[in-house]
Image: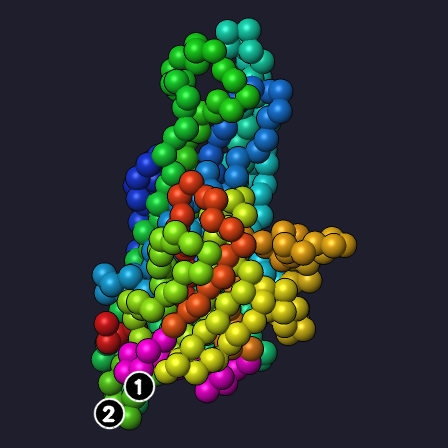
Amino acid sequence: MLKSVVKAAPVLNVVAGGTASLTIQSGPRIHAIILYATAQKTAATSGFTSIQLADVLGLLSGKVNTNPKRQHLAQELNEIQTAYESVLAAQLFDHVDNNFNAVADTTATYNSVACTTRTSTWVLIVNLSEPYRDSYTARAAFAWPTSWVSAKTGAVIGTANVQWDIAIPATTTSGLTASNLSTTMTSASQLIINYAVRAELVQDTGTGPLNTAGNPVMMITHWYRQQETYNNTTPVITRWPFVGNFSQTSIFSPSGSGDDVVSLGVLLNNKYMLNTSKKGNDLLKLSYAWNSGHLQTTAGDVAGANWPAADVFHVAFDFDDNPKAWLGYDGSVPLEFDITLAQVTAATKVLIMVHQVWRDALTS
């Protein structure tokens, strides 16, 4: 079907430290949500760097009928999508506002410190259909339907309420205020003001499928975000807050800590489904045409610090369009992740696991 790009409803409650909301009107199938997030940054001119994605967008939570179906940080989503293809990465546009009008840097001096204020806009596409699938038909099949039509009468027999909650990071002031930048600034001090977030929807006019009984079903890829603490180099994960068909799990180690996953065993009903090192795992992803730009090898790199995204281990079970290729888990038999870490030195020892699971969004 013809896909159109339309303005979404206004994103509400865009304030620092708050949770903005985007409500999607029932009717179309949604393929993607294009988020435009803008903020100003004021900091010492010496060593000035532009605002980062994590400074403007935090936890993204997609809900269907008030129940969370996708949860991930904007940063985590960007890492996962970039691992597939470089063109899926979020993009930074400096010196423009939320509507891409030019905004030049301004400079001022506060307590003898030269400072720069810059307006920047990040563009992040939340892909609900999956552009990295093998075929165009399969890619579109993953879009989110929001209405269902009777095959007999042509009447609408069901709709879904879809809302996205968007966490806006708190303003980092380091003693500064918007009205009086009078305290001594350091290179780390910054002030973020005038947040703006808007969205566009990529959609078509299709409706959702019906099951054999003629009732609506909403088969979508859920993204579950799970936190697991650890205190040794061999944590074992056996707790799962869901059932469904595992497409992928991305395990994020504490950033920059060196507590990286170096090998992983996945056992279903005590049988290995995957048992590999990170290097072997990454090479397998590259052989399936994942983003080769993620590969940064260094001669003699035994620890793997320069292998693709050292702080994340992508466990992909699904490399094609066949649902039978996924790791089915119905909760009736044990599922276990045996993780080996390079070391245990992080101040906060928490692994973040982002699971992609295919299941009906209307049943839970």
Identify the residue at image location x=66%, y=52%.
306
Q: Which residues make up the magenta segment? A: 320-335
Q: What amino acid does circle 2 point to?
A: Ala
Vertical placement of residue 297 versus 13, above or below: below
349 vs 330, nearest the viewer: 349
Q: What amino acid does circle 1 point to?
A: Leu
Secondary structure at numbered mark 2: loop
Disc 2: which residue: 213
26 vs 22, nearest the viewer: 22
**Colouring scheme, one of rainbow, by chain, secondary structure, one colour:** rainbow
| Disc assigned to residue 210 | 1
- Is residue 114 a member of the stretch shown in magenta? no
Instruction: Give the number of marks.
Output: 2
325 vs 129, nearest the viewer: 325
Vertical placement of residue 57 versus 182, above or below: below
- Residue 232 image offset from top left, x and y in percent: 42, 54
- Residue 227 image offset from top left, x and y in percent: 35, 55
284 vs 139, nearest the viewer: 284
- Is residue 330 a member of the stretch shown in magenta? yes
Q: Quadrant of the C terminus?
A: bottom left
Separation (CA) of disc 2 from disc 1: 8 Å
Q: Residue furthest right?
A: 299
Res 184 visible: yes
| Disc assigned to residue 296 | none
Identify the residue at image location x=58%, y=58%.
82
Identify the residue at image location x=36%, y=34%.
170
Q: Callout 1: few (<14), some (14-19), or many (20+) C-alpha neighbours within 10 Å?
A: some
Vertical placement of residue 48 versus 250, above or below: above
